[in-house]
Image (cartoon, rainbow, N blue to C red):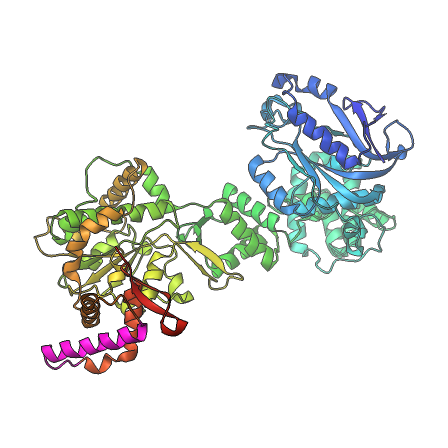
């Protein structure tokens, strides 16, 4: 096998490539492409494209019995060349092609005309915009003959879900070699995949696909076109082509098509006879003659029609289908055809469909039509299927319908929150440090201002950068009616982006799904925290993403968090566990009179959007959306005012103080728990009857001691040697 070359697309005399070292045909293409990438771009003006093509090297890979290029001289082909014209988005095309051709050995490169304006290309002079053309070369598992080559090329094009140039199917068609121009951006749009497998030729030659190359017995269609529908289309078409129908050759071509449609079962005999009368254009003499000609054609051996009834008579309105049968009819199991129909429908305004988009913030697909903007539902998709059938006679399969709708939505994804933040210019007024003070009457001090500011910075940072750290949780404390929950809802910007329904923090799917598509999650009265352990709560708050399988989805997905948490409570003693101090920051509200009414704010309020814009500007200037260690230390005295008295903590501190006083530097865990419980009882006796005493037992104290000691730096739990040489785990006081 070899590569044959010729200079200029009009030449037919070939030269056999003679590589310096033995290479396969694919390796030669690979080498030519790599060398081309290293070369300087060819310098010619766009208007000189015709001359440039005349000097371009053209290739055929396979085996020829003579060096004159024609079908008869080409015995076999070893590489599949696929030409793709008018690619809309080259970056998207390259990405999709790489995905579809995963595991194969191939080369993709832009053609010589790629990147040039349509108006400067002879065959595109009536078009606008930029022309993008690509050539795909795929290695084959074995050499193929003429009939096999057509099937292989079609199979690869179907695999890529692309519409190829018809020249790709021509047996002895040569293809332009890679060339680096000033226009085609070859360094960005070339892919050389040398590590894959050759395309399996046998997979393209399965019996179900051989009908295109082997004469199969004709089978009549089980879905004939109804007579009223057929005659309506023919009548409309005949009026438009009245002058042409007066010509014998044009008329004979038309009735041959109709008779063959009858032979194939698409039209009934009575429909074809009635069509003959329509084609007479109200001329009684022509009606008689037409019927005789139709009957004569029924005795002829006619070739199978290449066009469908809809194509011949322009009876079906629809897009330029991507995947078609050999007769040009759209494949119903094609995702690409669904996408093509949606594009066409939106452009033409046939059904009132305005858009289908994926909202990457809410993780929902949305549809906008005559009913307004809303989350896409199964009913909406079924309605689209009806429109496809009614408007274009396109009976798409269910899987291809849903896949196509989702692919279309993915290609038009957007993030309404991030878009709004980045589109809003901050007016320069400072707001984000004083929201709690102005709207809820919180004390206007350094502590409140710092927690307020850092939380809003954190909130906006996580919206713009999903999955970023956001474990600062303000807890708004104050009497009922101040508007704490209302403010939390309004700071979410939109009601749809707010949630107050989190029941616990144990990480089950139902609760995790409540965080998706939210900007603010309120922990009302801290109920969800009380239903979870301290460790579960801290872990839940600190997580940056959640893994779960959404309803109706087939696989587990990872969702980067967009939500920030804020707590509300009517009680001031909300902090119990000292190990969570860096996360939870109470803010006492109602201390002063609020200067602004939280109840005047609305969903998507411009004032809140300005808060977001100020925070975004601060982040862009380099301000950090978290508390530094020194800031945490400085703020803790104010935080501790909200700490609930903890009898076990007090008892443990007393026992540790006794140990230090006695000079004891190590103690076993169970002994420390026992002594702590003893101090608990002493303190209870000092304080009088304790209704909770029955709940404070050895097991609960042992568990609390382990967690509290684990958060300390002065006592470490480690293995030490005791009397007799035995080693045991003990708490050991570290030397300063």
Q: Name the quarter where the C terminus is drawn.
A: bottom left
Residue at 80% across / 58% down in the picture?
219
Q: Is residue 5 magenta?
A: no
- Residue 380 in percent (x, y) is at 48, 57
Q: Relative to 141, say whether 54 is above or below.
A: above
Q: How many marks?
A: 0
The residue depicted at 86 percent of the width and 31 percent of the height is: 70
- Magenta highlight range: 668-691
Q: Nearer the viewer, residue 264 or 271?
A: 264
Quadrant hosting residue 561: bottom left
Residue 163 to residue 563: above or below: above
| Residue 506 % position (x, y) | 37, 67
Residue 37: which quarter of the image? top right
> Residue 558 location, x and y as percent?
46, 56
Q: Does the magenta run of residues contain 676?
A: yes
**Magenta: main secondary structure:** helix
């Amino acid at each position: 096998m070899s590569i044959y070359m010729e200079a200029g697309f009009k030449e037919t005399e070939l030269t056999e490539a003679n590589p310096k070292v033995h290479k396969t045909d694919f390796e030669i293409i690979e080498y030519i492409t790599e060398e081309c990438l290293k070369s300087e771009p060819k310098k010619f003006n766009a208007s000189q494209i015709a001359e440039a093509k005349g000097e371009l090297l053209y290739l055929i890979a396979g085996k020829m019995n003579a060096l004159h290029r024609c079908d008869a001289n080409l015995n076999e082909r070893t590489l599949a060349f696929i030409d793709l014209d008018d690619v809309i988005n080259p970056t998207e095309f390259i990405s999709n092609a790489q995905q579809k051709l995963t595991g194969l050995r191939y080369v993709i490169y832009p053609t010589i005309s790629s990147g040039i304006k349509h108006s400067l290309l002879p065959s595109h002079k009536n078009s606008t915009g930029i022309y993008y053309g690509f050539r795909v070369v795929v290695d084959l598992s074995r050499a193929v003959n003429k009939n096999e080559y057509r099937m292989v090329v079609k199979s690869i094009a179907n695999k890529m879900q692309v519409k190829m140039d018809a020249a790709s199917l021509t047996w002895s068609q040569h293809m332009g070699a890679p060339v680096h121009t000033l226009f085609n951006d070859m360094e960005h749009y070339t892919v050389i995949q040398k590590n894959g497998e050759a395309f399996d030729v046998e997979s393209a030659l399965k019996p179900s696909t051989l009908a295109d190359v082997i004469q199969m017995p004709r089978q009549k269609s089980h879905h004939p076109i109804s007579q009223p529908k057929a005659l309506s289309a023919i009548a409309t078409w005949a009026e438009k082509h009245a002058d042409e129908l007066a010509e014998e050759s044009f008329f004979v071509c038309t009735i041959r098509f109709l008779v063959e449609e009858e032979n194939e079962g698409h039209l009934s005999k009575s429909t074809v006879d009635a069509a003959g009368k329509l084609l007479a254009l109200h001329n009684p003499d022509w009606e008689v003659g037409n019927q005789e000609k139709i009957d004569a054609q029924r005795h002829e051996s006619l070739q199978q029609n290449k066009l469908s009834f809809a194509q011949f008579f322009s009876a079906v309105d629809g897009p330029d289908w991507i995947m078609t049968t050999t007769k040009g009819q759209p494949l119903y199991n094609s995702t690409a055809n669904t996408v093509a129909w949606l594009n066409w429908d939106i452009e033409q305004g046939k059904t009132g469909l305005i858009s289908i988009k994926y909202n990457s913030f809410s993780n929902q697909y949305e549809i906008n039509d005559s009913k307004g903007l809303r989350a896409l539902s199964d009913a909406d998709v079924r309605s689209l299927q009806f429109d496809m059938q009614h408007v274009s006679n396109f009976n798409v399969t269910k899987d291809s319908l849903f896949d196509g709708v989702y692919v279309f939505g993915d290609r038009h994804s957007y993030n309404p929150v991030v878009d709004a933040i980045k589109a809003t210019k901050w007016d320069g007024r400072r707001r984000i440090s004083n929201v709690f003070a102005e709207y809820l009457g919180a004390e206007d001090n350094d502590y409140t201002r710092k927690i307020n500011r850092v939380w809003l910075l954190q909130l906006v940072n996580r919206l713009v950068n999903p999955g970023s750290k956001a474990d600062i949780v303000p807890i708004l404390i104050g009497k009922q009616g101040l508007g704490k929950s209302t403010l939390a809802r309004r700071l979410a910007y939109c009601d749809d982006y707010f949630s107050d329904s989190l029941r616990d923090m144990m990480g089950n799917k139902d609760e995790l799904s409540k965080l998706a598509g939210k900007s603010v999650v309120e922990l009302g009265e801290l109920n969800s925290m009380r239903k979870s352990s301290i460790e579960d709560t801290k872990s839940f708050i600190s997580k940056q993403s959640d893994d779960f399988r959404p309803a109706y989805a087939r696989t587990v997905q990872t969702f980067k968090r967009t939500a920030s948490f804020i707590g509300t409570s009517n009680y001031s003693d909300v902090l119990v566990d000292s190990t969570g101090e860096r996360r939870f920051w109470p803010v006492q509200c109602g201390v002063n009179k609020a200067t602004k009414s939280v109840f005047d704010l609305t969903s998507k309020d411009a004032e809140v959007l300005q808060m977001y814009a100020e925070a975004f500007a601060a982040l862009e200037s380099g301000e950090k959306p978290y508390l530094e260690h020194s800031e945490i230390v400085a703020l803790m005295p104010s935080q501790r005012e909200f700490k609930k008295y903890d009898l076990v903590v007090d008892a443990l501190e007393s026992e540790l103080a006794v140990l230090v006083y006695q000079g004891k530097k190590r103690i076993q865990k169970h002994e420390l728990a026992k002594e702590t419980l003893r101090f608990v009882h002493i303190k209870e006796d000092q304080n009088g009857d304790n209704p909770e005493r029955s709940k404070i037992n050895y097991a609960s104290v042992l568990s609390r001691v382990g967690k509290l000691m684990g958060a300390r730096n002065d006592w470490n739990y480690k293995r030490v040697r005791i009397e007799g040489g035995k080693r045991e785990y003990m708490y050991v006081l570290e030397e300063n």
